[in-house]
Amino acid sequence: MKSNNFCVIMGGGVGSRFWPFSKEDKPKQFLDFFGTGRSLLQSTFDRFKKIIPVENIFVVTNDAYAEMTLKQLPELSKNQILLEPLRRNTAPAIAYAVFHIQAINPNANIVVAPSDHLILKEDVFLSEIERGLQFVEKNPFLLTLGIKPSRPETGYGYIQENHEEIVDGIKKVKTFTEKPNFELAKAFFESGEFVWNSGIFLWNAKTILNSFKQHLPDIVNKFNEGKEFFNTSREKEFIDQAFPFCPNISIDYGIMEKADNVYVIGCDFGWSDLGTWGSLHEITDKDNNNNASLHCKTLYIESNDNIVTMSDGKLVVIQGLDGYIVAESNNTLLICKKEEEQRIKHFVTDVKFRYGDEYI
């Protein structure tokens, strides 16, 4: 059965919200955030290879990261690194991977996962993935993993479970909601009907391609023009020509929020999407004053609720800071209020405009 199970790791993001620790030439999925000796991408691969044959694991990433991906994952062949010539969000990237995998195995069951998530309860996670793969093999449904919320959180999307439509113990999705304000997040949390959207999806190749035909026909029609090239030596040439014609759209917005055959498993496996400095601060060990340090020695004086990361081996002395991000990487230092970290993307744009690509 396992020969029908495949994994797609999404590894093409630039991680600009973690600038300057994460930069375009080495974004966050290639970084070892916690000093374990393994990057986020490597940790994701290590996790999935326990239940999915290594030859059935694929990474979708950008042309610019081909060499870095192969260097970090030497167990994969070049054919398992699917390269986008430019960024077009998650829907075209997933369609590309599904077309490639379908050319190998038309009966494939596929799990799609980001490369930069933290999973603390790995055994529970893998058990839910195996359960999900069995579910989508038997049922023509799209499945997502939802995270049981521990608090009202405005940084995640929410999925409402339908407690009346249940198949094999798995509930149908009632609604998707983008990141809500605090009042709405509090109402969602207190209702007990909502889970966080993890961005982890499972489906059979036939099921998801039918959904593309229904909801994003432009993408599937474009890839059908070169269907015979997938999993051949001509695939890359075709993708380079076809990809720019695909709309820039996420799988959530393009399919998951529109389809009427979406189900969700509510899970608790110690998950963080590591999307922001705030989420990193939350899961990192802290001192008595709620200060967190990564990759450096720190001396905090009259300072609280900060997160500091530096190039390895540096000592940082901080006095009188409350609620700040202090992040350094090679030629760049960022000092930013933690509560205003959403502005970091704008800082990156301003730096690029004023000083060029050297610091990006």
Image: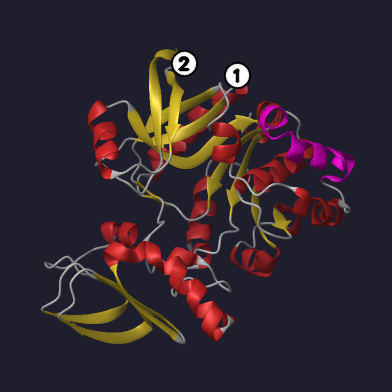
Q: How crowded is mark 1: few (under 14 residues within 10 Å), some or many (20 or more)?
A: few
Q: Which residue is drawn at 60% across and 33% down?
A: 255
In the image, taking residue 139 as reference, residue 314 lies left or right, namely left
Q: Which of marks 2 and 1 is nearer the N terminus?
A: 1
Q: Distance between the residues labelled 2 and 1?
A: 10 Å
Q: Nearer the viewer, residue 267 or 319?
A: 319
Q: Is residue 129 left or right of residue 245?
A: left
How many circles with numbers are drawn on the protein? Answer: 2
Q: Position of residue 182 (x, y in %)?
A: 26, 44
Q: Where is residue 191 in the image (x, y as percent from the top left)?
A: 25, 27
Residue 216 sits inside the magenta stretch: yes
- Which SS does the magenta portion mostly show? helix
Q: Please give left or right for residue 229 compared with residue 210 in the image.
A: right
Residue type beneath disc 2: Asp
Magenta-span inclusion, residue 55: no
Q: Can residue 360 be seen in this view?
A: no
Mark 2 element type: loop
Nearer to me, 177 or 288:
177
User: At 35% from the left edge and 85% from the top edge, which residue is drawn?
Assistant: 313
Judge the density around disc 2: few (<14), some (14-19), many (≥20) Cα neighbours within 10 Å.
few
The disc label shown at residue 138, or none: 1
Residue at disc 1, secondary structure: helix
The reply, left or right, for residue 268 in relation to residue 236 is: left
Which quarter of the picture shows residue 70?
bottom right
Task: Please determine whether, in this image, residue 68 is positioned above or below residue 52.
Answer: below
Q: Where is residue 178 in the image (x, y as percent from the top left)?
A: 43, 40
**What kind of residue is marked 1?**
Lys
In magenta, the rendered stretch is 212-230
Which numbered tag is attached to residue 168?
Answer: 2
Task: Specify the quadrant of the image occupied by residue 164.
Answer: top left
Q: Decide: marks 2, 1 in contact (CB < 8 A)?
A: yes
Q: Where is residue 90 in the image (x, y as percent from the top left)?
A: 61, 47
